[in-house]
Image (tube, rainbow, N blue to C red):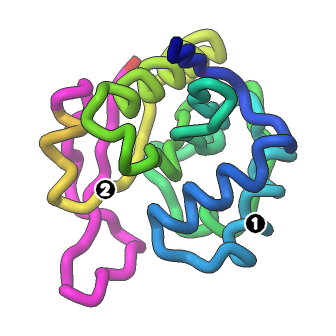
């Protein structure tokens, strides 16, 4: 029987989240491992994993922040969540390919929404490529325009800010 649970990350999940994140975003495992250790240590309350039969099959994470939009520094400098931060950021949402299109990403978003509400955040904010706007709109996010400090990908596409008010 498949038992799926969503829970807070622990350091025991490190290798599985490194593998998932590095594959999803085409980064080296070494680079990803350093980032993940800092994220697990600094904001484990807003780093959730979905596990099925003991295996991590997806995750969502990001720090709380006191600005409405993600800034590049958040990807490189991990900091603990502060009680008074008004916004919950999503830096990553990833699900293993074999488990996609089953509603798992939506469940992860909704689980993080519940955490953010309990922490009295005003909104959840993320950046995404234009091809994902429709996905996030269906989940209550609004397109608030192109990001200001994002570097376009090699095809010249810039990301957009998506925000969901809580």
Instruction: Answer above or below: position of 28 versus 81.
Output: below
Residue under the image location 52 percent in, 40 percent down? 58
Of residues 98 and 87, which is closer to you in this image?
A: 98
Q: Position of residue 52 (x, y in %)?
A: 57, 26
Which residue, given by chain and number where applicable, does mark 2 sit on?
128
Q: Which residues are magenta?
A: 138-165
Q: Position of residue 54 (x, y in %)?
A: 68, 28
Residue under the image location 29 percent in, 28 percent down? 102
Residue 43 visible here: yes
Hey, which quadrant is residue 46 in on the image? Answer: top right
Q: Is residue 55 left or right of residue 133?
A: right
Of residues 149 and 94, which is closer to you in this image?
A: 94
Few, some or many C-alpha atoms within 10 Å of disc 1 (few <14, some 14-19, many ≥20)?
some
Residue 84 visible here: no
Residue under the image location 17 percent in, 28 percent down? 138
Which residue, given by chain and number where applicable, does mark 1 sit on?
33
Tag 1 secondary structure: helix
Of residues 22 and 155, which is closer to you in this image?
A: 22
Instruction: Answer above or below: position of 97 versus 125.
Output: below
Residue under the image location 48 percent in, 75 percent down? 26
Q: Which mark lies nearer to you, 1 or 2?
A: 1
Q: Is residue 32 left or right of residue 134?
A: right
Few, some or many C-alpha atoms within 10 Å of disc 2 (few <14, some 14-19, many ≥20)?
some
């Amino acid at each position: 029987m498949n038992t799926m649970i969503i829970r807070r990350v622990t350091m025991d999940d490190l290798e599985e989240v490194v593998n998932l994140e590095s594959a999803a975003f085409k980064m080296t495992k070494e680079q990803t491992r350093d980032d993940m250790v800092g994220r697990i240590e600094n904001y484990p309350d807003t780093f959730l994993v979905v596990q099925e039969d003991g295996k991590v099959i997806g995750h969502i994470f990001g720090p709380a922040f006191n600005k409405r939009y993600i800034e590049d520094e958040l990807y490189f400098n991990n900091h603990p969540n502060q009680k008074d931060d008004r916004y919950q950021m999503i830096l990553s949402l990833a699900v293993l390919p074999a488990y996609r299109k089953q509603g798992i990403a939506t469940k992860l978003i909704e689980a993080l929404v519940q955490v953010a509400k309990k922490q009295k955040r005003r909104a959840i904010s993320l950046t995404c490529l234009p091809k994902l706007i429709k996905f996030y709109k269906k989940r209550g996010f609004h397109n608030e325009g192109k990001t200001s400090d994002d570097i376009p990908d090699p095809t010249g596409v810039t990301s957009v800010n998506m925000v969901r008010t809580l």
